[in-house]
Amino acid sequence: MSGAVHEVVGMRPGTMRRLIDRAEPGVTRFTAGPIEDHQLPLVVIRGVQDGPRVCVSAGVHGSEYCAIEAAQRLLAISSEIRGTLVVLPVVNTPAFRQRSVYTSPLDGKNLNRVFPGDPAGTQTERLAYWLVDEVLTHVDAYIDLHCGDLNEALEPFTLFREGNDKAEHLARVFGFSDVIASPATGMTISAAADAGVHAIIAEAGGGGRFEPQAIDSLVDGVHRVLLELEVIPHKVPPSPHYNPISVSRCVSVVAEICGLWSPTCSAGSFVEAHSELGSIRNFFGDKIASVTAPVTGKVMFNISSLAVNRGETVAGICFC
């Protein structure tokens, strides 16, 4: 990697904003402490030429490993770029260390449901506020990398807030065949959109597995977006051979009771409205609930573990 490497450690308000604004050409590694018991690594790659500011994050959910590994590989991008690339390789470090599914062990809240956060709230709410105030409001475009959590199987897709044409364009450029328009409340991309930042979520892989193909697809997708934004000048891998891109919506199906989950469908399968997605049994093996599809569509993700809790999303169905 060309360019000088600078090490910065700081916790004072405004430190990250100033770093994005004034970083010297090269690579700056930054360790932030936005809340107690939380060390957040960031890398700012600044090119010699002016250009857009783009943020790429992963690990908003700490056990989404393919996304985190993809972000790690982006750290090797040369500093011979236009503009500024901000990489947050593991946002939710407490959840990463505890292998926590969905939520933070600090307060039990899902970081990607509490944006734009609250400076006087719980740890997760304060972290969300810090990310918006210090990072997301100071970039032009944002890519938040995700994958299925430890208990999820998932088909690749990109997500943008519906009504944002420029974000939809970036979601298409990423290269996955399934693109979802979402109301996106409480999420990273909703906070970014409210700040005027064109933002997408990209998901591939899951189940706590190291999946080289999923990781490569996330890295290649980010490269395609950076090329589209004229951040990187070099050629990138061609788009993968997916089916033609379609834009749809997604509905979440939630378990209404705790128990043992037995799915009857898999990620990537097509289901009819009112057909059974799976059943829930009690500890004696009795079937106590049947979970059905509210719409006809494609299962984008579903719980692949035996345990399910009340209120958890057991499946997401993409429909036109």
Image (tube, helix red, strand yellow):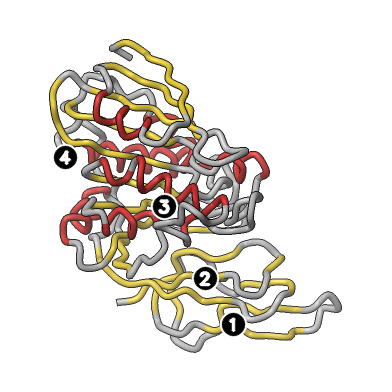
Residue sitting at 79 percent across and 78 percent down? 282
Q: Is the residue under label 2 in contact with that under label 1 (CB below 8 Å)?
A: yes
The answer to whether 83 appears left or right of 278 in the picture is left
Q: Where is residue 63 shown, x and y percent of the image?
A: 58, 46
Q: Quadrant of residue 103?
A: bottom right
Query: Alpha carbon of mark 2 to alpha carbon of mark 4: how far?
Result: 33 Å
Which sits earlier in the primary sequence, circle 3 or circle 2? 3
Question: In which quadrant of the rendered image does the N terminus lie?
Answer: top left
Q: Residues within 10 Å of mark 1 (few under 14, many from 20)?
A: many
Q: Which residue is mark 3?
A: 203
Classify 121 as above or below 6. Answer: below
Residue 41 shown left or right of residue 28 in the figure: right
Q: Amino acid at mark 2?
A: Ala
Lower position in the chain sequence, tag 1 or tag 3: 3
How far apart marks 1 and 2 lie (CA) works out to 10 Å
Secondary structure at numbered mark 3 = strand
Residue placed most toward the observer, 242 or 144: 144
Instruction: Confirm whether residue 238 shows in the render.
Output: no
Marks 4 and 3, how far apart at CA = 20 Å
Which label was assigned to residue 168? none
Provide the residue designation for mark 4. Answer: 229
Quadrant that contains the C terminus: bottom left
Residue 315's disc number: 2
Q: Residue furthest bottom?
A: 274
Q: Is residue 128 above or below residue 256?
A: above
Disc 4 crowd, CA 10 A, few/some/many (<14, 14-19, 20+): some
